[in-house]
Image (tube, rainbow, N blue to C red):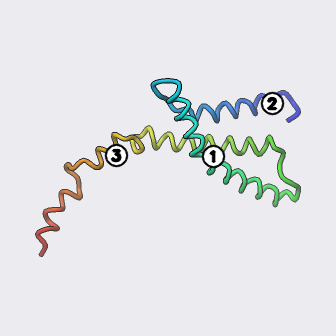
Amino acid sequence: MTTLREKITFVLTALAYLLFHLRLGANLTEIAVGTLSQMLLTAPYAIGFAYILAAVVRHLSGRGWPPWDRLFRLFFTFGILFAFFFALYEYAGQGSPQAVEERERPGASVSRFFEGVLRKGP
């Protein structure tokens, strides 16, 4: 990371990583806790994938490990991807408490539709 362009793109990648992990809340504490928990949730996946890709690059190139800034760029990139997909899951209603309550509420569903048929038997 010697040129100004590399430094700027590194900082922009880190800011994008933070932006994708940002979770909204009613106050600053909820925002900080939500963002931190999201970062802790995706960190193991991002670290693992970055490590695997760095090991593959190391093996194929025949040299040592990539420089630290390249490793962090890999980590940020994988972290952005995982944060995006986790956010899709959350904001689509799958991870919200309301969706869980709606799934557990007895109502009209396919399983309840066939309950009467299965109880009667042959």
Q: Which mark is residue 66?
A: none
Residue drawn at point x = 34 percent, y = 46 percent: 100
Residue at mark 2 = 7
Q: Earlier in the sequence, mark 1 or mark 2?
A: 2
Q: Amino acid at mark 1?
A: Ala
Q: Are marks 1 and 2 in contact (CB under 8 Å)?
A: no
Quarter of the image where one finds residue 8: top right
How far is the residue under mark 1 from the one under mark 2?
23 Å
Q: Nearer the viewer, residue 97 or 4?
A: 97
Residue at mark 1 = 43
Q: Amino acid at mark 2?
A: Lys
Q: Amino acid at mark 3?
A: Val
Q: Which mark is residue 100?
A: 3
All told, the count of numbered labels is: 3
Does residue 48 lie above or below 87 as drawn? below
Instruction: Give coordinates of residue 43: x percent, y percent.
Output: 63, 46
